[in-house]
Amino acid sequence: MNNILTTKRTFGIIGITWAIMIVLLVLSSCGSGPQKNDAKEIAEEHNDAKFENKEAENDAQYLVDAYSIGLYEIELSQHAKQKAVRDDVKELASKMIESHAKQNELIKSTASANQVSLQDQLTDEQLKEITDLGDKKGLDLDKTYLDKIIADHEKAIKLSEKAADKANVPEIRNLFSNALSPLRAHLEMAMGIKDKIK
């Protein structure tokens, strides 16, 4: 009798264990799809759901892209300001932080007025770029920072030119039109410093 009870208990425990394993397997497979943890992608999805016409979606995308570039420039420049070896690179980094912080405030205000969602974090790719900069030392860090700033400003200028010309909302066109002069000045400064350390 005791053997029968023991056997029943053993099979009961095995059955419960299998049931728990199956439930865990089902739960883990439900969450194994691609997960969006990129704040920029989430903001883009919110805007796509919010706006029904292509013009409004494009305007939102200009703001999201510009804000993302600004966040990246600020974070990248904070690293350079602390770790660069050349004084002119540190000075450039300080200007980038100040200028892009102001510009991002303007973008945030314009986005809010037009009900556009913005991200509050860097993308995964931007985080990798910053890690890459953090791994550099000495003049190698200075050069890498300048290369990244130059490439990013070229991208920001193209974006601003396009938005200044094609944005549907006049306020957004003006925002990008006004951004062009400082962006071009930053690019010129970065290229000038890079030329000195070749």
Image: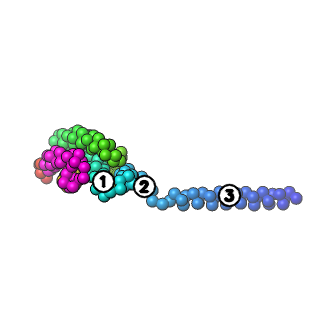
Q: Quadrant of residue 6?
A: bottom right
Left/right of residue 63 with respect to residue 24 in the rendered view? left
Q: Which residues are magenta?
A: 162-191
**Which element carries disc 2, helix, strand or loop?**
loop
Give the amino acid type for the residue marked by disc 1 in the picture. Ala
Q: Residue drawn at (22%, 48%), measured in percent from left and top?
A: 170
User: How would you rate the neighbour count of disc 3 (Cα within 10 Å): few for under 14, some for 14-19, many for 20 or more?
Assistant: few
Question: Percent x, y for residue 144?
Answer: 23, 51
Apparent side of residue 127 relative to residue 6 in the rendered image (left or right)? left
Residue sitting at x 75%, y 61%: 11
The residues tagged by marks 1 and 2 sit, at their Cα atoms, a distance apart of 23 Å
- Residue highlighted by disc 2: 36
Dot 1 or dot 3, earlier in sequence: 3
Whether 27 is among the magenta residues is no
Mark 2 belongs to which amino acid? Answer: Lys
Q: Secondary structure at mark 1?
A: helix
Pointer 1 with pointer 3, Cβ within 8 A: no
Image depth: mark 1 or mark 3 in front: 1
Residue 56 lies, with reference to residue 98, above or below; the image says below
Is residue 123 visible in the rendered image? The answer is yes
Which residue is identified by label 1?
56
Residue 94 rendering spot, x and y as whole percentages: 21, 39
Label 1 crowd bin: few (<14), some (14–19), many (20+), radius 10 Å? some
Residue holding disc 3: 17
Answer above or below: position of 28 versus 119. below
Q: Residue at x 16, y 42 (%)?
A: 88
Disc 3 residue type (three-letter): Thr
Q: Quadrant of the N terminus?
A: bottom right
Residue 7 at x, y = what percent?
Answer: 80, 60
Work out whether residue 69 can be spotted: no
The residue at the point 86 percent across, 57 percent down is 2
